[in-house]
Image: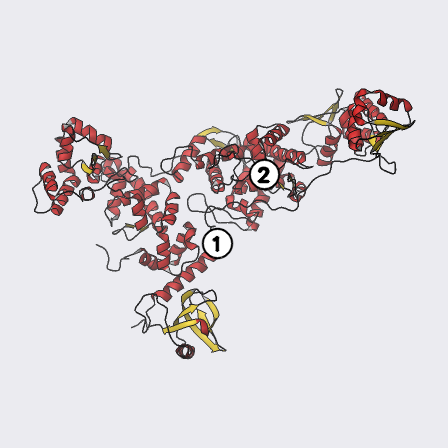
Amino acid sequence: MSTPDAPRSLAEALRASDDVTLVALLRARPDLLTPVPNDLTQLATRAGTRASVVRALERLDRFAQQVVEALAVAPEPATYEVLFDLIAGDLVGDPTGEEQAGEIRAAFDRALATLRGQALVWGGDDRLRLIRTTRELLAPTPQRPSPTGLGPTVAEAMAGMSPGRVQNLVAAAGLAVTHDAVSAVEALTALFTDRERMSALLDEAPVESVEVLSRLVWGPPYGQVTAEPAPHLRWLIGRGLLLPTAPGTVVLPREAALHLRGGRAHRVLEATPPALAVAREHRPQVVDVTAAGQAHTALATIDELLKDWDEGGPAVLRAGGLSVRDLKRTAVALDVPEPQAAFWVELAYAAGLIAADGEADERYAATPAYDTWQELPVAERWARLAGAWLGATRTAGLVGGRDSKDRTMSALGPGLDRSAAPEVRQRVLALVAELPEGAAPEPESVLTRLRWERPPARGTDSSDLRSRLARWALEEAELLGVTGRGAVASHARALLGVGAAGAAGVRGGPVPQGGGPGWHRLPSPAEYAAAAAEAAKLLAPLLPEPLDHVLLQADLTAVAPGPLQRPLADALSVLADVESKGGATVYRFTPGSVRRALDAGQSASDLHAFLAEHSRTPVPQPLAYLIDDVARKHGHLRIGAASAYVRCDDEGVLNEILADKRGQGLRLRRLAPTVLASGAEPAVLLDGLRSMGFAPSAESAEGDVLITRAHSHRTPPRTAPEPVPDGPPLPDSTLLDAAVRAIRAGDLASTAPRKDAPAVAGELPRTTAAETLATMQAAVMTGEALWIGYVNAEGAASQRVIAPVRVEGGFVTAYDHTADEVRTYPLHRVTGVAELADESG
C-alpha cells in the first residue's frame, strides 16, 4: 500500500526531493532551465511538455528506453516488481536464470534511477508513474501499438463493444455469464492473466490458430479479416483472443500477448551495452609512432593548403562555399582525394586559419591567426588543430551530399553544421580509449555500441546520421593523428581527458550538451590549456626533427630526407619546384624556378652560397651551370612603361625580337638602336618575351631592377566559426546552485501559508499604499518575513518572500529569499503584502 504522505503529483515529488536531485535533473535536462522556473510547479509542468519529453527520451540508452516502454504498458500506477516482471519475464523465479536475472535487476535499478533523476518517472516503488506526456507517446491504443509491439488491453479493445457481444465472448471462453459488461470484461482479463487457465485454453486451439497468434505476438498485433473469417480465425475471435478494433481489423489483446511472450514486454532484452570487438592489437609504441607520423603529415598538409591560398584562394560562391572545380583543384594541389581535401579545408576553417576576405570580389584567404599559429612549436600547432576538430560542429563528410532542398552541399558552404558531431566524436574516441593500449576496435562494434547508448529514431536504419558521424570520426581521427592503426595514441589520450567540450572551449564557443554517456562538464580555459600542453609534451619527442640540409643530385633535383626547417623550406620552395612528396620530398630545379629566385632579389652568387651551405653533397656541375646561365641572361633586357619599353645594349637581340613573328601581338617598334617601345602593359610584355625564350627583368622609372616577390594576402581579423549548439548549453555548477535556490524560494513564496491569503492560489496580494508601508515598517521592527506581489520595470509580475531591513525614501531594503540576496525595491512597484502564517499554527 502507498504511504499516506506519498506524492500525488510530480511537483510534490520534486518538492520532497533534495537540492542534489534537482541539480541532477537540471543538468540532465538543461532545457528545463531556460528561463529559470518560478517554482517547482512550473518546473514540473515544463518537464511534462512534449518537446522536452521527446528530447529526454531520445537521449536515453536502449535499456532505459525499454524500461520506459514497459512502464507504459503496465497498470498505472505500477509496483517495482510488476515492472521488473515485464522486463525479465519468466526469468523471475527460474533457478537456471537466477544469475542472469540478478544482472538484469542491477541494470534495471540503474535505469529506473536514471528515469527518476530525469523526472520521466516519479513515485515510490509501490506507485511508479510515468509523466502523462510520456505515457501518451508510448502507450498503445486500439489503432497504434506501443514500441514493444503490444496492443491495447482487453478493457480498452472492448470499450465500444455491445453488452451482448461481450457476454458471448465470455461464454465462448468457458466463463460464466455475468450480470453486466464490466464484470464480464474483468472475468476475461482474469482468464488471460491466469497462466494455468490460459495455457489450458490454448491447448484446445487449432494448430492454424496458434500459428496466427505466433505471427502477431511480437507485433504488430493487428491483423485483417474478411467478412467471413476462416474457422481457425473464428475460433480466436469467438474467445476474445482476437478483438475487433475497426471493420475488418482485429487485435491481439495485451494480456494474451504477454502470456504468449512469457510475461516479457520485449522480445530481445538489451540490459547491458554491447562489448567492443578488438580487430587488431599493436604495441603501444607502434601506435604512438604511427599517429605522430600522421600528425606531422596533417600539419604539412595544412601548411601546403595555406601556402596554396597565400596570395588569395578560390572565389566564394554566391551562396557561400567552394565550387566543385576549386575543390578538385585543391585536391590535386594537396595530392589527396576530394573528400580528404574537403576535410582539410574544413579543419583549417574550424581552426580559424582561413576565412572569406570580405572584399567585393570575395575570396578565401589565410587569416592573421595563421601567422601566429605558424610561430608555435610543431606539437602545439597539432594540439590546436586537434582541439578545433574535437569541438567543431561543421561536418566535412556531408560535402557533396544533398540538403533538404536537394541542393549540393559544398565545402565551406552553409548547411554543414551538425550539432551532434562533437558529442559523437568524443564518445567514439572515449570508447576506443577504453580498450587496452594498442588495441584497435572493429568499427562496426563501435557503431553497435553507439546505437545502444543513443538508439536512432524508430523507422531509421543503420545509416542514420549518428552512425555516419561515428564512421567519419574514426576516419578523421586516423588522418589527424589522434589514432594510429585504429588505436588511440598516448598524446591523444591526454587531450581527450577534458573531452570535446574543452576543445570547443578553447575558442570560447558554445558546446552542445546533453545527458547520456560520454558527457562531461565544460572545463575551464586553464584546464584545457593544461591538457593541450600535456598532449603537446607527449607528442613532441615522437615528431621528426626538422632538418637543415638537403641532398643535391646530378639530375637537377634535391632530396629532403625529412621535414625541413621553415627558413630552408621557404627558400627552397622559391628556388625549386616540388616534384614529389612523402617521407622524402623531391625538389626539381628548372630555368623558371631559378628565374623566380632571381626575380625575388637573389643573385647567382647568393644561390651558389645557399646551396653550398645547405647541401650535404657537393653542388652538381649541371645545377651550377643552370644557375649561371639563367643569371647571365636575367636582366639583360629591361622592361619599362611606355605603355612599355624594352631596352638592351645588344642591338642584335632587339633585332631578333622584332623579327620574331611570335612578338607581333606585343606591338613593338624601335625608338632607338637600343630601345623598343610596346603598346602592351609591362607585365604583358614581360610574360610575352619570356614565352619567346628570353629572360627579361622589369625595371623601375629610375632604371633600377624591380624585385618581385609573392605578396601574402590576409583577411581582416576573423574569429573561428562558432559551433552550433545542440539545445541549451549545459549550465555550470554555480548557475545550477543559484537556479535551485531561486526555484526553492519561488516555491516557498507560492506555497507558504499566509494570513488572510486570497482564495485563488497564486494570486498576487493587493493592499493600499498606506497598508503596504505600515506592514513593511512593522516587519522591520519584528523581523518577520512577508509575502509580496511585485511588478518590475518591464511589467512582469512575480511573488516574493522578503525580510524587510529598512524602509526609507520610497524604497524597501530587504533580504529576498527568492533571489537569496539583499535587494532594494521601489514601494510603488509593490502591489501588496501579506504576512506569512505562523508555521506552528
If you read the primary sequence from the N terminus, does the residue marked by circle 1 or circle 2 appear first? 2
**Kind of residue at badge 1:** Asp
The residue under the point 24% across, 49% down is: 76
Dot 2 lies on which element?
loop
The residue under the point 54% across, 51% down is: 524
**Kind of residue at badge 2:** Arg
- Which disc number belongs to residue 318? 2
Q: Residue under circle 1? A: 732
* Residue 397 or residue 570, whichever sits in front: 397
- Which disc number belongs to residue 819? none
Marker count (numbered): 2
The residue under the point 41% across, 50% down is: 29
Colouring scheme, one of rainbow, by chain, secondary structure, one colour: secondary structure
Q: Quadrant of residue 83?
A: top left
Give the Cα separation between the discs numbered 1 and 2: 40 Å
Q: Is residue 188 left or right of residue 145?
A: left
User: Is residue 616 at least partly visible in the picture?
Assistant: no
Residue furthest right as drawn = 673
